[in-house]
Image (cartoon, helix red, strand yellow):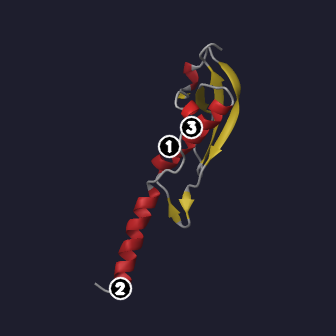
Amino acid sequence: MKTSAKCCWVAAFGAVLISGCTWVDLKPQAEKVRILAPQEVGRCREVGRVSANTAAKIGFIARGKDSVQEEVHRLARNNAADMGGDTIVASGPLIDGEQPFKVYRCINP
């Protein structure tokens, strides 16, 4: 196999690996923050709003939608925990690696 062909295969393999990676760690206090639907927070108290965003592309390579969504959820849960919330609800769609959330306190509101 020619050197240029090997380089292309290595680059393609690397792109596949990168597209599925997540780099955001969930803080210990955010592990209990739940992700619920709007109809599930009727008895909860809204404590604020956050917008979580992460890179949807690395260079010209699009990351996997599931990886981006998982990262955005982790970021939103981290932010909710910092605000004293225990629940997040998406208040809009995931677009280009960014999504808005409402933060609630449902346990002992």
Quick one: quadrant of the N terminus?
Answer: bottom left
User: For residue 104, which numbered disc appears in the image?
Assistant: none
Amino acid at dot 2: Thr
Instruction: Name the residue: 35% across, 81% down.
Output: 5
Assess disc 2: are there few (<14), some (14-19) or many (≥20) residues with their C-alpha within 10 Å of its C-alpha: few
Residue 92 visible in the displayed image: no
Q: Is residue 71 above or below residue 10?
A: above
Q: Look at the image and tell me in which quarter the C terminus lies.
A: top right
Q: CA distance from mark 2 to mark 1?
A: 37 Å
Q: Vertically, is 4 above or below 101?
A: below
Q: Position of residue 108 (x, y in %)?
A: 62, 13
Q: Nearer the viewer, mark 2 or mark 3?
A: 3
Look at 58% across and 31% down and name the residue there: 29
Most extreme residue toward the right is 48
Q: Are marks 2 and 3 in contact (CB under 8 Å)?
A: no
Residue drawn at the location 40% of the way across and 61% of the way down: 16
Task: Tell me the SS state at disc 1.
Answer: helix
Quarter of image, res 80: top right
Q: Position of residue 84 (x, y in %)?
A: 67, 26
**Is residue 76 visible in this depiction of the protein?**
yes
Task: Identify the residue position indicated by label 2 in the image.
Answer: 3
Residue 22 picture location, percent across and down: 49, 50
Rendered residue at 69%/23% (across/down): 46
Q: Residue furthest bottom?
A: 2
Amino acid at pointer 3: Lys
Residue under label 1, please give it. Answer: 70
Q: Name the secondary structure under disc 3.
A: loop
CA distance separating discs 2 and 3? 44 Å
Q: Which mark is residue 27?
A: 3
